[in-house]
Amino acid sequence: MKLAARTYILAVLIFLYLPIAVLIAMGFNESPLYQLPFSFSSHWYVELMSNRKLLNASWNSVLIAAITAVIATVLGTLAAVALSRRQFFGKEALRLLLLPPIAIPWLITGTAMLVFFYWTGIGRGFHAILIGHVALAIPYVVLVVGTGLTTIRADLEEAAMSLGAPPVKAFFRVTLPLLAPSIFGAALFAFAVSLDQFVVSYFLATPGSSTLPVEIYSAIRKGFTPEINAVCTILLLGSVSIFLLFTLFAKPGASRDRS
Amino acid sequence: MKQSRREFLTLLGAGTAALSGLSATSRPARAAGTVTVLNWQGYGTDEKWALEAFRKMTGIEVVNDYFNAESEMITKLRTNPGVYDVVLINSARTQQAMADDLLDAVDLAKIPNAAGLVPKLRDNAAFTVDGKHYGVAWLWGMNSLAIRDGRPLPESYGALADPAYKNKVAMYDDAVTAIALGAFMTGQDMNAPKDLKPIGDWLKSLKPNIKTLWSSEDQWNKGFAANEFDLSVYWSGASVRSQRNFKLPVTFVVPKEGAVGWLDTLAIPASSTNKTNAEAFINYMISPDFYHEWATKIGAPASANALAMDRLPADDLNRRVHAAHYLETMTLMAPLPDDRREGFNNLWQEVKAYYAG
Amino acid sequence: MPADAASRTPPTPDRALGAVPSAGLRLPSWLVTLTMLLPTYAWLTLAILLPLGAMLSFSFMTATPLGKKEVAFTFKHYRAFIDQPYLIGVAWTSLLIGLWTTFLCAVVGFFTALALARATAGRLRETLLILVILPFWTNGLVRVFSWTMVIREGGFLDLLARSVWPDAPSLGFLYSLPAIILGLVHGYLPYMVLTCYIALVTIDDSILEAAESLGARKWTVLWRIIVPMAAPGLISGSVLIFVPVIGAFMEPRILGGPRGVTLGTVIEEQFTQAFNWPLGAALSFTILALVLGIFATFSGVLRRSSSL
């Protein structure tokens, strides 16, 4: 049974990584038109190293995604806890308000932000992109953390409180550790939402503050070259190594030991 | 508790400082000596060597910003007053921008190279009002057919419906161009067709042949390189680049009905604060020097400057594709009233839904 | 009482977090709630809800009120489905794509999460979970383009097939509905895996053992215990997938080619090509209304079933 389950996971991973493997391979293919047959070349990596614009944009993307993940996770977790554990009027309405940012195509949201930020003087630039990204990421955080909260038994908190723990302490000692995987997952998603977000960034970027997806999106018309694959590969390897270090040095399953 | 609150405030302060610092640096430098250009990416104004040459000549730094659709260009102009100094506008769109007072007239006397402009293009009524020019004619080109080498050259757009090209045709995903071809085939004026119904019917009749719809040069090149299609509606200037830079076996053909022509201008936004720099940049862009380099090394549409075209070698591919006689036979895209444009878009949308079904 | 029922019972108000007066800290309950909610909803209001409100008002106008053009009130954009009947077919295609994508993600994602939660532990589990989410961190556009290289005629799929059987017919299916769904499933699967995993990881072994010792068969355990426990995860995963997929335009356009005409691409073109924001906005708000309607119906059903 265990073997079957693990084989299944492996199959899913192969599906998930098939296009990623192609992406990486094409970064080493000589043809600028991604033509086959494959012929090895490190040409595009050399090109990339002198493409300051692309490198700058990539750095902007990572920075914005990291700040977005932190802000959205903190705010979204607070809201998710309130929505799931506290009683107040209008809760359902607040839940539904999380849907428009997900349901309305980003193109419309982006256009709306551009016009609204123009009217209110928020303008465009790094700060505007950040405001937009956090807002887009928050609903994802609330939904993911909210799912975690529905599966954590509220009676554990109550038990702690009935043993005399103050509610805040009960939350930090009981709920939060149990919730940690959800919060971590939510942060990963917030990061991903921001990193891949091109429409909103596209409308709110000023010349010079652009992000990697914006560069890719703008390049569609003219044509993007395997340099893009090269930069994606580097970013991917970067995040893989960060995570490998993380899992190697973090205590395995630390967050769940107490359950 | 108190401690952590103070820490939090410090953190917040540091964060805000970092952010404001970043947003300050991310704004383009607005010092004297820059010119900010709004254009398609990879369309001349961002060629590295050209910007280098221009800076050496004038000391002016060029900042590029891009749009991906003409409507987006107008939105960017509206919502970013004062940011742009030069903007690329298709002559069919100029009146839309003028209606909102987004453009200033350009004094051609201050642009020496304007002397070489073909008068027909220079004074085109789409952007010339009472003798004032709301844009400088820069480039023209054609949307027509491209065929894979080895296949017979098509004599008419009717080839798009030829069963010989079953599943081997790529259409340009653009309402105006698609309706124009339909208008040619039904004997109507592409800028003011009287009856859209037969146009829609003709476009729908292409369905068995349509392999793909393309919307970018990149998509076209990659699809053609992967042998997805043999016959396609394509841009004249892009066909030169596909042949010359990517060595693709393709030939650009203008069939007997004539090509769908377009004319791009460089205009100066009314809100520009660097108008002198803008004039200098436009002057460079329409110069034979820049054009010669761009057209022979990279591949470009045709210059509106006759002197620039004359500078090209007689057998130059770009010159052959954009032979001067096409200027007489092609139908130029004209400004469209809103309701007509909407009608075009709705029809093309309907045709595409039919292709999908 | 089954565990999932217990977990969904809201704590009684007087025992809820922050409500019980504690030693040092006395804050009125409403103030705590407000402090927790305000930052999020203030941010959402400023950055998304107000801008979308402006867009909603545009959808009732004859033109975008940005230029000098006269603008009048109109309902005509909301009549688009009547005036342009082919849009109904387009909406049907979008719905099919959305349902298939969500269904496939639910099936594949649920079992992946189950396998992760039941057959792995510790460091291996964390590594695998991260590996599932990591593809998300590569650019979506580039990922979709990579798929085109796999599934086009003469692409990687064909190369692979022909390395086994040289005369294999082309397996390429680029520019078709299955191609669109493939790309979307690939893009959205990690959401479902994560939400289901979060729901399943808290399953108590003792419950499953008890069920099995009482003679319950594997399928019974799966359907009667595990799936209901995973329900919150399946639901939020489906929200995160179905809702944005209806408006997606990149995957349909690139992988669907001429077959990829969906509500998402129609809306996109109203904004980019046609410059008809009011119509594009009206179409998206119609979708939003449908989505909210579905949720209003479903949340009632869900509440009823959980109160049983």
Image (cartoon, grey):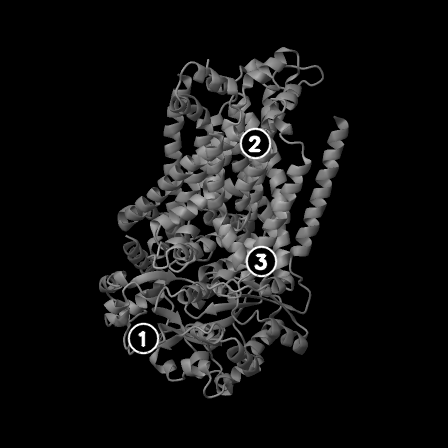
**Which one is in front in this view, the residue at disc 2 or the one at disc 3?**
3
Q: Which mark is residue A230?
A: 3
Q: CA distance from mark 2 to mark 1?
A: 60 Å
Task: Tell me if mark 3 has few (under 14), some (14-19) or many (20+) residues whose alpha carbon lies within 10 angstroms of its own.
Answer: many
**Which one is in front in this view, the residue at disc 2 or the one at disc 1?**
1
Res C60 seen here: no
Task: Tell me if mark 2 has few (under 14), some (14-19) or many (20+) residues whose alpha carbon lies within 10 angstroms of its own.
Answer: many
Q: Amino acid at mark 2?
A: Ser
Q: Chain of mark 1?
A: B
Q: Position of residue B192 (x, y in %)?
A: 30, 68
Q: Position of residue A136 (x, y in %)?
A: 53, 42
SS at circle 2: helix
Q: Is label 1 in contact with label 3 (beta carbons under 8 Å)?
A: no
Residue furthest right as drawn: B3
Residue B157 vs residue A94: left or right? left
Q: Which mark is residue A182?
A: 2
Q: Which residue is mark 1?
A: B151
Q: CA distance from mark 1 to mark 3?
A: 37 Å
Do tags 2 and 1 sit on the same chain? Answer: no
Q: Position of residue C55 (x, y in %)?
A: 45, 46
